[in-house]
Amino acid sequence: MHCLALYQRRQSIAVNALLSAVLGLSAVRVSLPQGELLLRTEELRDGLWAICDAKNEESEAARLKLANDGAAAEHVALLGQHMTSLVQVELDRFLATCQFLYSYCHYAQGIYHPPGADKPLCPLPTSLVAAAAEPGKPEVVAKGAPPPP
């Protein structure tokens, strides 16, 4: 029984120290029963949870506003277009290097007009060339497309 009383006294001292640190109250100076102090701490805890919930709802609303804005989708589409154009440029560079090496190997063997040297190894239908239909107004047409009327 003596151990239980000692434990309760230590717990009461710990609770008083916590209350004095958090609430700024001294249990020695204030003659509030422990039940009232516990009720006040529960009210403060509920108030703190209400503040946290309000902040959480506010941040969720801000996140949904950003998600529904459409700027992120536009940015992703723009990045996709840039990456596609970079891949196209690298593919064109690779094919030009292959064409150069094809011609170089034939020239090194003494064949000065190798078969197919005048046309690309792999023509790309997406690469564009300027067709001079009118001197003042150049049109852009895909390779292999029929000339404009």
Image (spheres, rainbow, N blue to C red):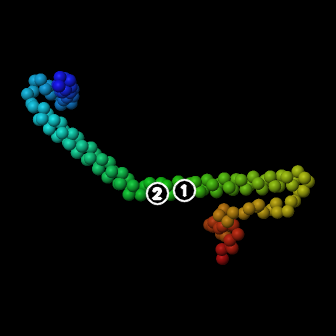
User: Residue reaching furthest left?
Assistant: 31
From what the image shows, is residue 23 above or below residue 132? Answer: above
Closest to the observer, 50 or 73: 50
Kindly identify which numbered label has been placed on residue 34.
Answer: none
Q: Is residue 77 visible?
A: yes
User: Residue reaching furthest front?
Assistant: 1
**x, y percentage for residue 26?**
14, 25
| Quarter of the image with the N terminus in it | top left
Q: Quadrant of residue 2?
A: top left
Q: What amino acid is labelled 1 in the image?
A: Gly
User: What is the total number of numbered labels drawn onto the structure image?
Assistant: 2
From what the image shows, is residue 48 above or below residue 122? Answer: above
For label 1, the crowd category at 10 Å Cα-Cα, with few meaning under 14, some 14 to 19 and many 20 or more, is few
Q: Residue at x 26, y 47 (%)?
A: 53
Kind of element beneath mark 1: helix
**x, y percentage for residue 123?**
72, 63
Q: Residue at x 8, y 28 (%)?
A: 31
Kindly identify which numbered label has been placed on residue 80.
Answer: 1
Q: Is residue 104 left or right of residue 42?
A: right
Kind of element beneath mark 2: helix
**x, y percentage for residue 131?**
67, 67
Q: Residue at x 68, y 71 (%)?
A: 145
Closest to the observer, 6 or 147: 6
Q: Which residue is mark 2?
A: 74
Q: What amino acid is labelled 2 in the image?
A: Glu
Q: Is residue 28 left or right of residue 96?
A: left
Q: Is residue 135 visible?
A: no
Q: Is residue 110 left or right of residue 80?
A: right
Closest to the observer, 143 or 4: 4
Q: Is residue 107 left or right of residue 45?
A: right
Q: Earlier in the sequence, mark 2 or mark 1?
A: 2
